[in-house]
Amino acid sequence: MEFPEAATVLGARLAAGDDSLAAAGAVHLAIEAWKHLGGVDPAWDRFGLEVLDVRSRLYEDDVIVEAAAPDADGPEVRAAVRDLIEHLAQHHDRRAVAQDGLAQRLDHDAAAQQLRRAAAVLA
């Protein structure tokens, strides 16, 4: 599966509801984009730092998504990543409301904010 298509599929799964497997897959796909495109534009490195921090705090299982890595930076790839990350941020918004403990709510709220910052640097 091509990278933009994989991002669209995962984004749709996240939009459909609370899908922790799709969320972990979205984090993996975002990090793969950063790994392949970091160094091309400093924006990708700022993006990667935010996503790596979210992964280290909230994602224990490393889900692997079988998708071709993006081979070049461009508007289609950036749009696909931004959309995917926005869906992931919305997932964390929903989790922030649904969690019982204050610490978990704050973790998810912080993740949503970080992910939105990450997406904004790619605009």
Image (cartoon, rainbow, N blue to C red):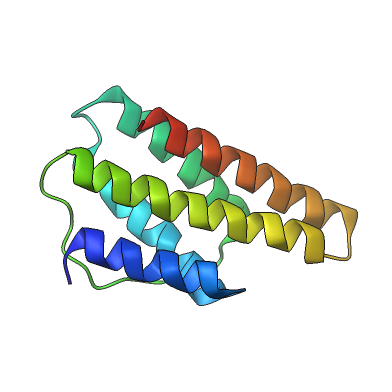
Q: Is residue 74 in sight in this rendering?
A: yes
Image mark count: 0
Nearer to me, 54 or 15:
15
Rendered-image quadrant of the C terminus: top left
- Which residue lies most toward the left here? 71
The residue lying at 89 percent from left, 61 percent from top is 101
Q: Position of residue 86 (x, y in %)?
A: 49, 49
Image check: 11 left or right of 7? right
58 in relation to 71, above or below: below
Image check: 115 left or right of 74? right
88 in relation to 113, above or below: below
Q: Position of residue 55 (x, y in %)?
A: 52, 53
The residue lying at 23 percent from left, 59 percent from top is 4
Picture quadrant where residue 8 is located: bottom left
96 in relation to 82, above or below: below
The residue lying at 41 percent from left, 29 percent from top is 121
- Which residue lies most toward the top here? 42
Picture quadrant where residue 72 is located: top left
The residue lying at 29 percent from left, 53 percent from top is 32
Q: Position of residue 103 (x, y in %)?
A: 84, 52
Q: Is residue 35 in sight in this rendering?
A: no
Rendered-image quadrant of the N terminus: bottom left
Nearer to me, 116 or 67:
116
Image check: 32 left or right of 17? left
